[in-house]
Image (spheres, rainbow, N blue to C red):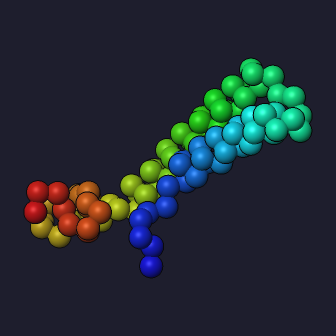
Amino acid sequence: MLRHEFQPGRLVAGGFLTLAGGLYAGDAGGLWDTPWFAVIPLVVGGLCLAALAGTVAQAVRGRRRKVPAGDGEGGHARDLREDGHAPGR
């Protein structure tokens, strides 16, 4: 049983920031020489990919949460909260 919902955007962002930290740690440990500006494209690209992954996940998640209304409103879809109930009820 999952304790929270899966958030792929945070996973992607965390992976790229960990990679950037690893590059600087290798530089600090003397294993290689990393220029200060080399990590900027890595972090910016990772954040852009994280935003894309989060947007796609939200679009898929939002599409699955729509259910037909059973209160005679002509079959319009209504949004559900996390607990499965309609807002305001």
Q: Is residue 89 left or right of residue 19?
A: left
Q: Is 63 left, or right, of 77 in this rendering? A: right
Quarter of the image holding residue 2?
A: bottom left
| Residue at 75 percent of width and 22 percent of height | 36
What residue is rendered at 49% in x and 44% in y? 55
Q: Which of the image's four quarters has the C terminus?
A: bottom left
Q: Which of the pair 65/74 is nearer the observer?
A: 65
In the rendered image, residue 76, in percent from the top left (x then y), is placed at: 23, 58
Report whether residue 10 is seen: yes
Q: Nearer the viewer, residue 48 or 42?
A: 42
Q: Residue furthest bottom?
A: 1
Image mark count = 0
Kindly give the residue lying farthest to the front in the view shown: 29
Residue 36 lies left or right of residue 82; in this view the side is right
Q: Is residue 70 left or right of residue 29?
A: left
Q: Position of residue 40 (x, y in %)?
A: 69, 25
Q: Position of residue 31 (x, y in %)?
A: 89, 38
Q: In which quarter of the view is residue 61 placed?
A: bottom left
Q: Which image quadrant is residue 72 in?
A: bottom left
Viewer-proximal residue among 15 and 55? 15
Towards the viewer: 68 or 43: 43
Residue at 64% across, 29% down: 44
Is residue 16 something that shows in the picture? no
Determine whether 42 is above or below 75 in the image.
Answer: above
Note whether 4 is above or below 1 in the view shown. above
* Quarter of the N terminus within the rendering: bottom left
